[in-house]
Image (spheres, grey):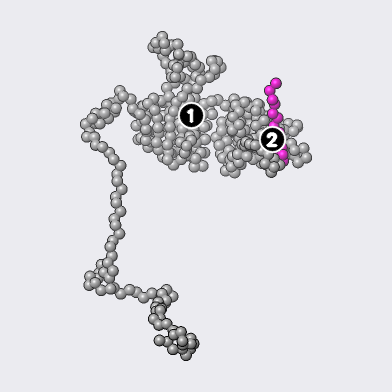
Amino acid sequence: MPDLNFIEHHPQHVLEAFRRGSLIRSKSSGQADEKEFFELCFKEKMLEALAQGMPTARKKEEVPRWFVLAANLSLKLHLENSFLALERVVRCGGLLSAMPPEIASKHLDPQTRQILLECRGFNDKNTYQRSTPCDQDFLRKFVKEVTAPQWMDWFNGPVQQVFQSYGFFDPAGVFIGDGSYLFVPDNEAYEGSVVMWFDEHNHPAEYEKLTAQERKKAHRERCYKLVSLLHLRGDSYVYAGLAVVPGNTHEDPVLYGLVENFVRHVGRGVIKLLILDRGFIDGPNLSRCKKEWGIDVLLPVKKNMDIWTDAWALAKQAPWQPWSPPVAPAKAPPPIVLRGLSAGNSSGKKPLRPKRPKNLRRPPRRRLRAPNFVPSRASPVGPNARFR
């Protein structure tokens, strides 16, 4: 029978163990980080700004949209995809600790040492004590009632506008366009998905053109295609736009549509450099990026393109020379100044120097000379003594 470990909230025991030095290791649960995150969101009023353009299918807003957004963010911070985990996430996370006390509170009972949740909610329909500000089934229905294109339009438009108002995008303006396949179970309930053939490297393949050996390694997958516009921030990246389309859709027009939509909502000058792969080579759209939106595009070229042939022809005709890093210029030696000579004095006479202030003058030097005489042994030494 496997061992069972029960974890309870006993902060006093943990503090006593810290004082005794009996803790072998400790691990942060992330509750403080989540609380700090939501406290900053409430302080900057970011959730309210994001919820203003948030789509909804309900005519009456019983639960504010900012809490729906906060609850979904809390689930994602805990890597939960099911709304059934809402009560557990609320109990263990830091969302309630950051919310106003008139809506919900979370504290430790000093007598029972148990965590107490007091949620008043947003309406007076329920008479029993709440464990969460709203029911998990309400969140599920709220998200399901809005279509996927509406969610993507909200994220690609109003969300990016709010991010721009808070100075979210890096001034360097480096973005990346990417297209990847999302494999899902072979179930027709996945609306808009298609079944395609893929080779051993998960690249799409035409089954009729594969050899007998390649067909053994090929496999069929039901999939979508995720086309994303990524923004580089330091050593990480964030999504500045995305679109989930059927797997057999070409990503080229979808990506340039995301770029155009981003520039329309956020403005020119935010995207300065767009890095793409060969699948996005499109002459008219590349020209639009530079002429209409002021975006420089960096991408590799194909060997069968004229620009590739032209580059190699120029490389063969140009004279090649070995390159070496530039040598830093040597520092000029300090000028030699002869004593008594200056730029305006060629006579050799010592120039006159300005007198120093009295408080900075040096004290006069006193020369002490040793006597060259020795007192006589027979003569007494005193004020009337005579010396040889």
308 displayed left or right of 357: left
Give the residues in magenta: 1-15
Could one spot residue 80 in this view of the protein? yes
27 displayed left or right of 200: right
Q: In this view, does 372 lie above or below 227?
A: below
Q: Main secondary structure of the magenta part?
A: loop
Could you say where residue 153 lies in the image, as x and y percent from the top left? 51, 30
Q: Earlier in the sequence, mark 2 or mark 1?
A: 2
Q: Name the residue under label 2.
A: 121
Residue density around tag 1, few if under 14, some if 14–19, many if 20 or more, within 10 Å = many
Q: Mark 1 points at which residue?
A: 242
Q: Is mark 1 on a helix, strand or loop?
A: strand
Tell me if residue 14 is in the magenta stretch. Answer: yes
Foreground of the two, 216 or 2: 2
Question: How many dots with numbers?
Answer: 2
Q: Quadrant of the N terminus?
A: top right
